[in-house]
Image (cartoon, helix red, strand yellow):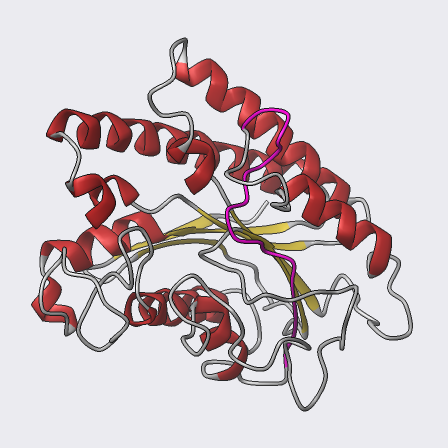
Amino acid sequence: MARILSILSAFAVLSAEVYSAPAPHPKYWFAFGDSYTTTGFNITTGPLPNLSNPFGNPAYPGIGPCADNLTNWIDDLTTVYNKSLIFTYNFAYNGAVIDESLVTPYLPTVLTIKDQVDQYLATVASRPESTPWTPENSIFSFFIGINDIKHTWNASGSRTAFDDVLLDDYFGLVEKVYDTGARNFLFFDVPPVNVSPLMLAEPVASQTTQGVIIDGFNARLAARVAQFDLSEKGVKALFYNGNTRVKQILKDPKKYGFVDNSTFGIDSSQYCWCNNYHLSPGVHSYFAQDITELFDLTFTSF
């Protein structure tokens, strides 16, 4: 098995598996997640990703938690930092949790990761003529956990045991995607939303407790990703430590072009946060740049 290369820099922490020959560049992206990823894609109504709009629907850059005309990391990776054409099937949904049987979402209409995977399985998993992806030209990303923690961080009982329950369910869904032929994966950890403007209005003890829970979940997630990478044949599982990147930005916001670490507004050139719980497009752009570097270590081009 190839060795793991860890890059620790002042800008980000990236982990990637290094192979003797770079893998082919993925041309189909299948994304699962919550408001930090969503662009409002609807695979039922269409249109599907195409040359005019690589996201298919809605009109670029889609519908996000900040404003309908603002971008996030997957917008940037698909249209700004890409080195070839990418068709992005973005199943992510605002407010998503992993599974509503474990954590109740804020609305009953929210599509959980389980729902999103079910949508994928029912539509493009079979590689229809409209979406001729292959194991070599596709990548599957998962960015989830923010809302699972948000809704349960102050619950009673063993947190480590509950995290294991969440991750068992999470990777059971990942295995379903793997079984369709997916081999290239990107996983995100949970950003430090315990220091979001929303949480800064709460007692310091609450911020600290939530931060400890986020760090614990992320450590277990990283271990699961490594286990998945080692145990499943042909898998290239990449892990992006966006939590560290955000902490670096918030520690010295002016270094990264932001006015401070707590004011929020839709001007992504000034603020780290676009509202009281979501990182701004400016921070998402740093995510995209980091992931481009991560991909360059593994894929021929991106």
Q: Is residue 97 magenta?
A: yes
| Rendered view: 41 above or below 147 | below
Horizontally, residue 167 falls left or right of residue 264, namely right
Name which residue lies at 52% across and 38% down: 226
Where is the N terminus found, in terms of image quarters? top right
Where is the C terminus found, in terms of image quarters? bottom right
Task: Give 176 or 195, whichever is nearer the viewer.
Answer: 195
Tell me the quarter of the picture where residue 139 sits: bottom right
Tell me the quarter of the picture where residue 284 sits: bottom left
Q: How many marks?
A: 0
Task: Give 56 or 289, whichever is nearer the viewer.
Answer: 56
Question: Residue 254 at x, y = what percent?
Answer: 8, 69
Name the residue furthest top: 157
| Rendered view: 77 above or below 80 | above
| Rendered view: 20 above or below 102 | below
Question: Residue 181 at x, y = what percent?
Answer: 80, 53
Name which residue lies at 82% across and 50% down: 121
| Rendered view: 7 above or below 290 | above
Name which residue lies at 60% across and 45% down: 110
Question: Residue 271 at x, y = what percent?
Answer: 19, 68
Q: Main secondary structure of the magenta part?
A: loop
Question: Residue 63 at x, y = what percent?
Answer: 51, 69
What range is drawn magenta here? 86-103
Q: Is residue 244 magenta?
A: no
Horizontally, residue 56 falls left or right of residue 147, namely right
Horizontally, residue 39 falls left or right of residue 88, namely left
